[in-house]
Amino acid sequence: MIYNNHILLTYNNIYRAVDKCGRMIPVPYNSIVCAAAGGGAREPLFRNPSSSASVYLLQFNCNRRRINTNNRRNNNNNFMDSNNNMRTESYLRHVDSRKLMPNGAGHIPHLKAVILGEALASEEDDLVLPSKEFSDQANVHSPEQYMEMYKRSIEDPDGFWSEIASQFYWKQKWGEKVCDENFDVRDGKIKIEWFKGGITNVCYNCLDRNIEAGLGDKVALYWEGNEPGLDGSLTYSQLLNQVCQVANYLKDIGVKKGDAVIVYLPMINELPITMLACARIGAVHSVVFAGFSAESLAQRITDCKPKAVITCNAVRRGTKPILLKDIVDAAINDSAKDGVSVDVCLVYDNPVALKREDTKWTQGRDIWWQDVIPKYPSTCPVEWVDAEDPLFLLYTSGSTGKPKGVLHTAGGYMVYTATTFKYAFDYKPSDIYWCTADCGWITGHSYVTYGPLLNGATVLVYEGVIYFKTEIYCNLFICMMELEKMNPTDFEIELISLSIGSLVDAKKFKAIISRRQKLSPGLSVIKAPNYPDAGRCWDIVDKYKVSIFYTAPTLVRSLMRDGEAVRYLYALMFTVYLCAIDLRINAFGFWIRYVTRYSRKSLRVLGSVGEPINPSAWRWFYNVVGDSRCPISDTWWQTETGGFMITPLPGAWAQKPGSATFPFFGIQPVIVDEKGVEIDGECSGYLCIKKSWPGAFRTLYGDHERYETTYFKPFAGYYFSGDGCRRDKDGYHWLTGRVDDVINVSGHRIGTAEVESALVSHPQCAEAAVVGVEHEVKGQGIYAFVTLVDSVPYSEDLRKDLILTVRKQIGAFAAPDKIHWAPGLPKTRSGKIMRRILRKIASRQLDELGDTSTLADPNVVKQLIEFSDS
Ligand code: 6R9
């Protein structure tokens, strides 16, 4: 199969060849591809009738690459300063090596290296190129066009961003300065201001402006319910009407510009509607993910002292109703103890999940949404705000127990989310866009609500949970066969229900579970996301003809694994219990049938966010979900950054599976060493950003000092992201995960300190240390070392109780995957816990424990290892 310059690429039986422009072309199975020094063709040169193989002739130029490599070396030499440190003053160093690559990125060494999937080339050398058709129609279609725009964005940020900002509506243009910043703690207080003095309104720009431009009848929001068949849609005009009604109501109850409103809603249209209504009247929304516990919600209420809390009586997750209003009640009670009272609680009535009459009610405080909102006028004047007035607060985990209120302001955030959305997803007005994130996280703010609506896009809002954690498949087997006979513990049932999703026709299973639930009413079972089955995503994609699909690696990985489970189940059923089981027919499929039985033809661009996407998940997403047609935008960014920072521009350059590639316009990422010295060229270190960008957060609510200490003091002169990063020889960025005490579970940020403080609140827990461990599906899992108070014995019940405590205090997503009994914790003589050692023990890298002699009691490590398997 391999001729001359080895240009046939195969992966998972999907064959690609590279044409003379360096672009991938699909080659039918059983083809032979050969390279030649002259001429090239996309049509087969000849077909071999006996083997059905075709021969393609392609061409590329090897010499050019050699010249490029030399260029890069020379350039690197220029990076050396007088102290022999790798430095450069050139602002283009972030993309330096990129520009040396030929157009279309004909990366020859890569071509020599592959047969992918068999003898795997180094990930670094694995280039996946956009098709010519895609690049030709893309908003940014070549590395040159990107370079030109990037250069301008860095050399003349004021000009670059004010040109873009002018496309929005400003009641009054901004003042003299487009950007005013102090990014260096050594020069005084950190300050970031963009478009200050400009008067605008983000809601007006999302809705009124688009309606005036003729989009009134375009669908703004499609809504797909958790229950198949439950759906709806709102045009831009209808959305504006509803937003105005809520805005009028909020004004009526006394919510004014600058007041906070807490929103604790599931993914129903009322969530973006409420966010936009707040923006319309200048109120500051703080959306709390409706998976957070009462304690976490109370903490946020106490911090921002909202004028109102907006919630919903209940929501269905899979088949299970979650009583959100009960959680809000408990939170309001809690915050009242801290002296913060909530006068109004607006409750959306969701009869699919809970009857009105079954909802607990506090007269005088609680009001049904449906009883009041429709009575308000559907027009509402806009409250014009300064670009630097706050738009929203979003709490995020930090390395201490107290969550941080990340504050974003109106003008810069508006301009930045709109621009990043347009370019990173190559947005076109005909697109149907679906982001699976919940509005409780930043992705739902920037890329479900504001970014797409500012572009006049059609957005799909999906109520269901599509992340699912397929944990323990042998339990699935047990559950199917023997559940009643074996009388499993509640915890086992919970695991089973997590695993089972709806791989099997769960009728019988559910009957058993409900019997069990009657026996133990507290039992929480059946999360069953991807309800009713693992193909739901693609069913939705086909139903709405979704063209841009943006999700998290955790979903991609779980779908990959789900397939394997089906295969496992399939074999098991046939060999052992075929007749005994009532299995749904479609479980007997090939392992990717949950994807491939749907067309997915409408898909054009895929996106990934929340955590590093491992190359194999990337390839599966690309090859199976995207049929090897759709570029993937692996977008690196944070709650704090407001929008994408490092991201592919899908039509512009070749991607490397697992790399977020290059910086967005106006972003100068730098990699620094421990001393804060910038490193150039190929390197790894701490990822920082030089200079501000319009979407940057302006402060931590009520705690500017913590803002400076956390983000600007670790490396003076830079914003410190908290992430590690590697830059490869071609200038591609590879995010390596958090370097601080934050764990990223299924794309959700959880501070180790938050989990620890929940654990030690248990009366029998003396001390706890939490670390992240690699997890096949969730990216990272939570591993807790727990020391009990004297004389309390270890027990299974206590273990469950500790997990329950964390679920109650933070939320189910923060529950530890493993509790490791720890008679003692490894501490330095000054009492600092050596997490490095705990991480190694947790990941069973026992031969890499390193020097333990500095510990106050080195024996602790031996004990911990002994307890590993207990
Ligand atoms: C948008 C969001 C931020 C942290 C961030 C990093 C991780 C996000 C990533 C990624 C690698 C990507 N992260 N996107 N890591 N590749 N494409 O998730 O915000 O919840 O604040 O989390 O998530 O570690 O520091 P947030």
Image (cartoon, rainbow, N blue to C red):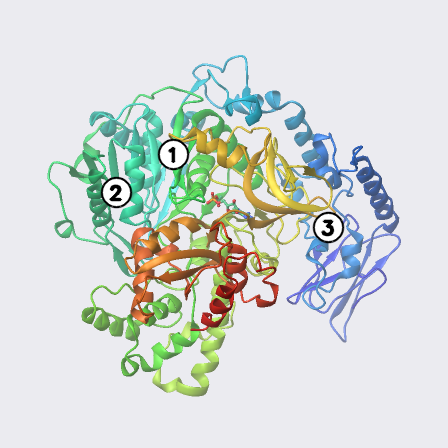
Eye-nearest disc, 1 or 3:
1
Distance from Cα at disc 2 to Cα at disc 1: 17 Å
Within 8 Å of ligand 1, the CB of disc 2?
no
The image position of residue 869, as x and y in percent, is 46, 73
Can the viewer see residue 696 in this picture? yes
Quadrant the N terminus occupies: bottom right
Circle 3 crowding by C-alpha within 10 Å: few under 14, some 14–19, many from 20: many
Taking the image as shown, residue 177 lies to the left or right of residue 118, namely: left
Taking the image as shown, residue 822 lies to the left or right of residue 850, namely: left
The image position of residue 400, as x and y in percent, is 42, 44
| Residue at the spot of label 1 | 393
| Residue at the spot of label 2 | 311
In the displayed structure, 856 sits above or below 198; it is below
In the displayed structure, 663 sits above or below 736; it is above
Within 8 Å of ligand 1, the CB of disc 1?
no
Q: Quadrant of residue 733?
A: top right
| Residue at the spot of label 3 | 23
Between discs 2 and 3, the one toward the N terminus: 3
Q: Quadrant of residue 140?
A: top right
Q: Amino acid at mark 3?
A: Arg
Pick the residue in front: 476 or 59.
Answer: 476
Pick the residue in front: 812 or 28.
Answer: 812
Element under disc 3: loop
The image position of residue 42, as x and y in percent, is 76, 55
Element under disc 1: strand
